[in-house]
Image: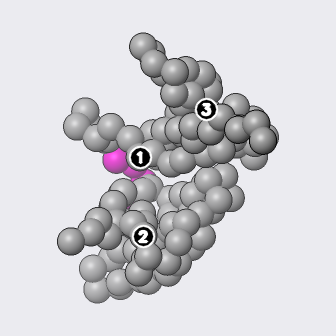
């Protein structure tokens, strides 16, 4: 077994696709309208669906806003430099809701951004490997 995708309901599909592709650097993998069901699905990710988990953005026609509830936490993505990633995302209009810095009680550098619908995405800085003298 493997994780295929995580589904998020979004109020404005084009705005959400722009966020995940332009700000987070994912690719739009596919987009399909389902007129009988009055919804559209768009799949975004860093790699093809056959090779990794992706995000399914679901837009139910006529619904512009969802209550997120208290059960959902966040998605997480790995970044080389959380400080630089936050600066780049802010420059593109992204909303940083927790600036880059060490996590509480730890040394891992994290940050949080928010997508247009209010879903939180954690940026986790890759651990820097100590260079060896040679």
- Of badges 3 and 2, the one in the foreground is 2
Q: Mark 3 points at which residue?
A: 96
Which image quadrant: the C terminus?
A: top right
Element type where label 1 sits in the image: strand
Dot 3 or dot 2: first in sequence order is 2
Going 76% across and 36% down the picture, which residue do you hit? 133
Rendering quarter of residue 36? bottom left
Front residue of this view, candidates 17 and 111: 111
In front: label 1 or label 3: 1
Secondary structure category for the residue under label 2: loop
Q: What span is in magenta?
A: 62-66
| Between discs 1 and 2, the one toward the N terminus | 2
Q: Is residue 120 above or below residue 98?
A: below
Earlier residue among tags 1 and 3:
1
Query: Is residue 86 among what the camera can see?
Result: no
Residue at image position (51%, 66%) is 45
The x and y percentages for residue 97 are: 55, 28
Q: In this picture, is 126 found above or below 20?
A: above
- Tell me which colouring the rendered structure shows: one colour
**Element on which disc 3 rests:** strand
Mark 1–mark 3 Cα distance, whole angstroms, equals 14 Å
**Residue 49 picture location, percent across and down:** 43, 77
Graded by Cα atoms within 10 Å as few (under 14), some (14 to 19) or many (20 or more), the crowding at tag 2 reads few
Locate residue 76, reporting x and y percent.
Answer: 45, 45
Q: Nearer the viewer, residue 89 or 123?
A: 123
| Disc 2: which residue | 52
Query: Is residue 19 shown left or right of residue 92?
Result: left
Residue 84 image point, x, y percent: 74, 37
Q: Residue at x 56, y 28 (%)?
A: 109
> Label 1, label 2: how many angstroms apart (C-alpha)?
15 Å
């Amino acid at each position: 077994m493997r994780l295929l995708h995580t589904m998020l309901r979004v109020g404005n599909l084009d705005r959400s696709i722009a966020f995940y592709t332009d700000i987070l650097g994912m690719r739009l993998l596919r987009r399909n309208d389902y007129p009988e069901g009055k919804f559209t699905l768009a799949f975004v990710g860093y790699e093809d669906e056959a090779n990794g988990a992706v995000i399914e953005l679901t837009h139910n026609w006529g619904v512009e806003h969802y209550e997120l509830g208290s059960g959902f936490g966040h998605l997480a993505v790995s970044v080389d430099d959380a400080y630089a990633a936050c600066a780049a995302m802010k420059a593109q209009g992204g909303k940083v809701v927790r600036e880059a810095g060490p996590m509480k009680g730890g040394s891992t550098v994290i940050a949080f951004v928010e997508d247009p619908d209010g879903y939180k995405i954690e940026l986790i800085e890759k651990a820097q490997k100590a260079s060896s003298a040679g």
